[in-house]
Each structure stands twice: as structure tokens, then as C-alpha cells.
Amino acid sequence: MPAVKVSEFVYGRLQSPDLDRAETFLTAFGMVRAARTKTALYMRGTDPVHYLHVTELGEPRFLGLGFAVTNPDDLKRVARLPGASGIESIDEPGGGKRVRLTDPDGYGVEIFSGIEAVSALPVVRQALNSGAGRPRNGVLQRPPRGASHVKRIGHGVVMTTDLARKVAWYRDTLGLLASDDVYAGKPDNVIGSFNRLDRGDAYVDHHILFCIQGKKAGLNHLSFEVQDIDDVMIGHDHLKAKGYDHIWGIGRHELGSHIYDYWLDPWDRIHEHFTDTDTLNADAAPGLHEADALNGPWGEPIPPSFVGHASV
Ligand SMILES: [Fe+2]
């Protein structure tokens, strides 16, 4: 039995030496400022979630990931885990209560409840006509140029030197389910593991956490869902025009199947735009695939700089 089953992955927490530069990048990436203090920046998307990206002022570092539980009693269970902080009041926008844990590589895992919701931001998106049907008959589509419109955070990808230990810890602590594992050479040489939320019959993203085996521990990337394929493409042009560094994309993944586009922030932390992910519920059986499945039906092969990337 896992300690709890978290209900959602909600934010990533980074540390950066210049909050102005961080905000300029994240705004160009398609987020909106939720709050800013002298020492931290909180960015949100269009969903009614207080923040999905936290930047604390300091040397560039990956600090950790934040997950929600819906039952406040779950925090009591988490607080009894080895190394847990105890239940704290969150001294950040939206308040709430949380317990801080440390994963096997020393990175933060925050489990919280009760952060105040905010109003959703308006977005105008039209349904896309396709071979499957024409839901937009008679309605003209004229998406404006500019930044993407980040909707929500989708997943985090973390690298570790001990994949089995890391994956077991996250599954046991957060109640995650195995979606797909990836191996190199022999099937018992697992080099990557996709994990999703367990919300029973409800459908969730194919993964909220992908753990990969590597030469060091750290963050490979944080991934944010945007509104649709136009929002990926238009946002790509916008970031390019602003002079930001692109690392991989645009393409479609095989596992999870989402359309992806990967960018570097000013301190080389990878931020992904995605749209059109697969969803699964708790009934789906785990898959096992050769590493070749990390390439998709279209798009460039993974660049080596991406495969080995971990922001500490
Ligand atoms: Fe991703």
C-alpha cells in the first residue's frame, strides 16, 4: 500500500539568480504572473490553479516538485513517513498546508492540500476540423500570433543514477501507477519508467513522472500543456523570435503520444510545451518497450544533449 495516492501534480520549484529574467522567459513561454515577492516568483496558467511554477531567488538549482492530495487527513499519513517535515502552514500565495519530503536523490517533494484556487483565465480556442470530423463548420479560425497559453503543468522528468530505487520510492510514496517502462538491450535493463496518477476510473495523463537512468541526478524537464497544436506552433515562433534556445521538437512522442516542443530557460533548464496526450485510467496494464520507442511517428530523433540532460 502506498502512503497516499496524490490527486494531481501541480508545480515545479526551481531556483534562479534573476527573477526578472525568469519572469521574462516564463511570460514568453506562455505563463502569467500569479504573484511575486522579493525572493520568489509564482507563475500560473489558464486553469484555476494558483501557481504551477515557482522560482526562488538564488543560484540556479532544481528544488523539487509539488503534488496535491484532496483529503487533508492524507497529510497526517505523509507526515509520519521517514524524514517528513511535519504538517506546515504554507507561507506562500494561496496558503494551504503541506508536508515536505526528500526523494532518494535529495530533491524536494512537497505534498499539500488547501492552496486557494483562483479564477480560470479566458482562452478562445476553436475545435479543430480533421479527418475524424468537422466540429468547426462555418466558424472561421484566426488564432493570433504571440506566446502560447499554458494551461497546466503535465509532468516532470527526473534523472537518477539508481532508477529502481527512485521509481519504487515515488510509487510507494505518492501511489503512482506504472504506465510504460523502457529498456535498452535486455528487457531487465530498464532505463526509463513512465508513471501516472491513480485516480481509479478517472482518466489521467499517461504520465506525470518519467524517471530516467543517467550519469547524475537532477531534473531533465518540466512539461506544460498548452491549448492545442496551434498554440504549440505559434508559441514556438514566439520563443524563436525572442531569441531563446530550442533543444528538441516539434514532434510527436510514441509513449504518451503528445506533441512536444522543448526549450531552454536562461539557465538551461528544459521547459516543454505539449498538447494531445494519451490518457489512461487505473485499469491500463503496464507496458514494456525497447528504447527505440522513445522516438515517435514524426519529428527529429532525440538529440544526445537532451538524453543526457539533468539540471541539478
Ligand atoms: Fe515531456
Image: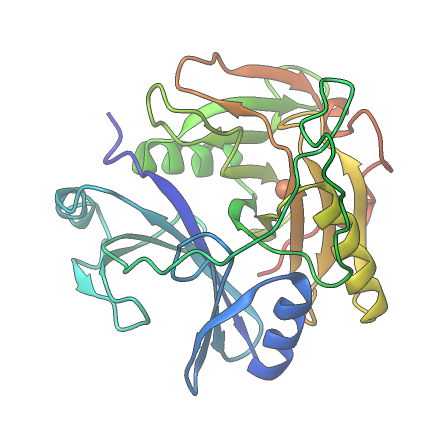
Residue 240: percent from the left, percent from the top? 83, 63
Residue 214's x, y, as percent? 64, 43
Tell me the quarter of the image containing the C terminus: bottom right
Residue found 52% across the figure and 33% down from its top: 207
Extreme residue in the bottom direction: 38
Residue 235 visible, this angle: yes
Residue lying at 47% horizontally and 14% vertically, measured from the top left: 284
Q: Tell me the quadrant of the picture where the N terminus can be found.
A: top left
Q: Evaluate whether residue 214 shows in this view.
A: no
Q: Quadrant of residue 260?
A: top right
Number of numbered labels in the structure image: 0
Q: Who is closer to the viewer here, 162 or 29?
A: 29
- Report the front residue among 109 and 71: 71
Q: Position of residue 76 (x, y in %)?
A: 13, 47
Q: Which one is nearer the viewer's eye here, 58 or 230?
A: 230
Measured from the top left, where is residue 118 in percent x and y? 35, 60
Extreme-front residue of the structure: 138
Compared with residue 263, is residue 170 higher up or lower down, i.e. above or below?
above
Judge whether 107 appears above or below 161 on screen.
Answer: below
In-image side of 165 versus 90 (left or right): right
User: Quarter for ligand 1?
Assistant: top right
- Above or below, 69 relative to 167: below
For image coordinates 33% across by 31% down, the residue present is: 175
Q: Is residue 64 left or right of residue 136?
A: left
Q: For residue 78, which quarter of the picture?
A: top left
Residue 245 in the image: above or below residue 309: below
